[in-house]
Image: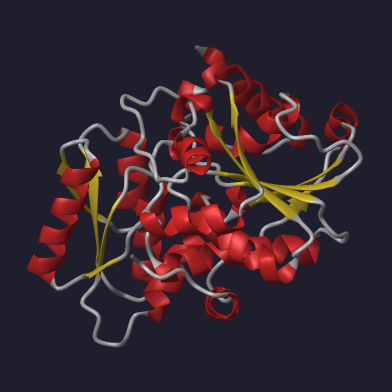
Amino acid sequence: MTPPPDFAAIEEAHRRIRPFVRRTPVLRAASLDQASDAHLHFKCENFQRSGSFKARGAFNATLAAPDGTAGFVTHSSGNHAAALALAARTRGLPAHVVMPRTASAAKKSAARAFGAHIIECEPTLAAREAEAARVAADTGATLVPPYDSTEVVAGQGTCALELVEDAGVPLDTLLVPVGGGGLLAGTLIAMASASPGTRVIGVEPAAADDAARGLQSGERQPQVLPVTTVADGATTALSEMTFGVMSWLVHDIVCVSEDAIVQAMRLIWERLKIVVEPTCALPLAAVLEARVDVRGQQVGLILTGGNVDLDRLPWLN
C-alpha cells in the first residue's frame, strides 16, 4: 500500500508549493448563512492555478522529484491532467497524460493548453493504469497518480491548512467532496493536527456512493458502473491508501441527490457570483438536504474547482 503522508509532510508541502500556487480566498454569503442557519465559509479552489485544487498535489509531487527526472506521466480524465501538465511545464519537463478516449474535448484541450502530451486509451481504470505504466517504462517518466500518491495527498492537505488559518474562527465542521479520496485524505490528516476539534465529513453523490458503502462495511468498495452523476469529479473509487485514511479519521460520509447537486451549484453561481463545477456543489448540497446537522455552526466547505463546460450547464438540460 502507498504510505499516507504525516502532518509534517503536509507542512513541508505547503512551504514547497507556496511560490507556485495561489492562496485561494474564503468567501461568505449572508443569504446562504440565513438559508442554512449556519455560518458557511467557502474555500474557493476554483480560483486555483489550472482551475482546481489538483494543482496543489501536482506541484508538490513534481517539485519533490529529484534533479534528472525525465518527465512525468499520469492517467486522468479531468483536472489532474491539466494540473500535472502545468506543474511539469514549470519545471521544464514533459508531461504524458493517459486519458480515456471518451474524455470530453474540453478536458483534453485544457491539458494540451498546459503542454500535455495526450495518449488515449479505453475508458476503464485497468486500461488507464496499464497504458500509464507502459508510457513510464518507454519514456523513463515518473508516475504521478491522481490520488494514490504520498506527495499528491500531502499537497492536497495544504488546502485545509489555509482554510483553518483564513476562516478567522474555529470550524465546527468541514465538508469535503469525495472522489478518489486524495483531497479527503489530505484534509483528514491536516485537520487531525491543525484543528482536531473539527469534524470532517465527506460528501459524495448517491449515484457514486462507494465511500459511504466502504465506511459502513469496513471494506473498500468498487464503484458501481456505469456511474451516472453530474458530479463527474466524484466518480472514481478510493485507493487502498485513501480508504485507510478515511476509515481511520473521517467522522462520516453522506450522500446527496442529483437534484440537490444541481440546486447547490446554481446557488453558488447566483449567491457567490463565481463559476464552479458540479463536484464543488457536493458540500452545499449536503447542507441543503440536511444530510448533516450544521445549525448554529461554523462550517467550512471546500469548492474543488471551476473547470466547467459552459455549453453543458446542468440546469440548461
**Residue 135: image x %, image y %?**
13, 61
- Towards the viewer: 27 or 246: 246
Residue at (31, 75) in percent of width and height: 92
The residue at the far bottom in this view is: 67
Residue at (51, 59) in percent of width and height: 245
Decide: is 189 above or below 234. below
**Residue 39 appears left or right of 188:** right
The residue at the far left in this view is: 138
**Residue 102 appears left or right of 307:** left
**Residue 260: image x %, image y %?**
64, 22
Residue 275 in view in this figure: no
Residue at (15, 42) in percent of width and height: 121
**Residue 55: image x %, image y %?**
48, 60
**Residue 68 appears left or right of 136:** right
- Towards the viewer: 117 or 121: 121
Decide: is 238 above or below 60. above
**Residue 39: image x %, image y %?**
87, 43
Decide: is 165 above or below 46. below
Q: Quadrant of the N terminus?
A: bottom left
- Towards the viewer: 184 or 247: 247
What colour scheme has been applied to the protein in the rendered image? Answer: secondary structure
Residue at (66, 49) in percent of width and height: 251
Q: How many marks?
A: 0
Residue 219 in view in this figure: yes
The residue at the far top in this view is: 317
**Residue 181 appears left or right of 28:** left
| Residue 86 lies in quadrant | bottom left
Decide: is 267 above or below 78. above
